Amino acid sequence: MLITFEGLDRSGKSTQAKLLVDKLAPQHRVLFIRDPGGTPISERIRDILLDRSHPELHPITELLLFSASRAQVVSEVIAPALRQGGIVVCDRYYDSSTAYQGYGRGLNVDTVARINAFATGGAVPDLTFFVDITVNEIERRRMARGLSIDRMESAGREFYERVRRGYCALAKEHCERYVIVNGMAPVDEVAQEVWEEFTKCQRSKRT
């Protein structure tokens, strides 16, 4: 079973992904992956993508680097785990490329989708959680925690508004696997909703 968490930066998706993994771990073979990342090659690519010293990185180059990282982790880690009957939880997956590089950077969304499918060998999530927050909340959380921004996060407010609209469009298009959760709610409330939706999905897979 492949479960993905999507959302804007600082949405709390990583926290929710890890909480789900912790809850599943005692009784399931579960694997946590961050995207980009998850293998030595993918982590090297991640470093390039987030490095603020590369502002000249072209949107197409950015898309292909994300896809290259994803292709490696799917081939090396995700696909083998799924074949063995495990549960894989991904902090971001190919929907991030559609939202960020397609809607955010303005690349052709259909082209992005084809590249996504090619890079992942058609490994489609069974369940996707979109942890939704406002763009204003991104800045509030960053300031509250005194965090610096990486290259992706330096794109600005309008960029993030487009990305959020992209995620909303994806949730509508793929309603059979998407669950929108309110990332503005307390962490434990979000975690409970995630768990309930996971168990519902798991039951439906068994019937």
Image (cartoon, rainbow, N blue to C red):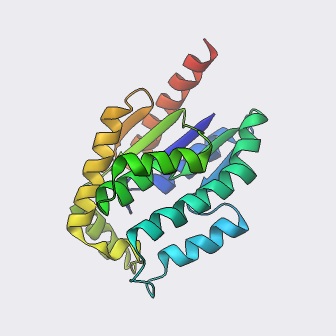
Residue at (20, 65) in percent of width and height: 158
Is residue 200 among what the camera can see? yes
Rendering quarter of residue 202? top right
The quarter of the image holding the N terminus is top right
Counting from the top left corner in percent of width and height, residue 145 is at 38, 74
The quarter of the image holding the C terminus is top right
In the image, taking residue 78 as reference, residue 147 lies left or right, namely: left
Vertical placement of residue 123 versus 46, above or below: above
Residue at (37, 29) in percent of width and height: 175
Counting from the top left corner in percent of width and height, residue 173 is at 34, 33
Vertical placement of residue 31 versus 39, above or below: above
Residue at (24, 57) in percent of width and height: 162
In the image, taking residue 137 as reference, residue 57 lies left or right, namely: right
Counting from the top left corner in percent of width and height, residue 126 is at 54, 32
Q: Which of 103 and 157 is in front in this view?
A: 103
Specify the farthest residue to the right. 84
Q: Nearer the viewer, residue 181 or 19?
A: 181
In the image, taking residue 94 as reference, residue 89 lies left or right, namely: right
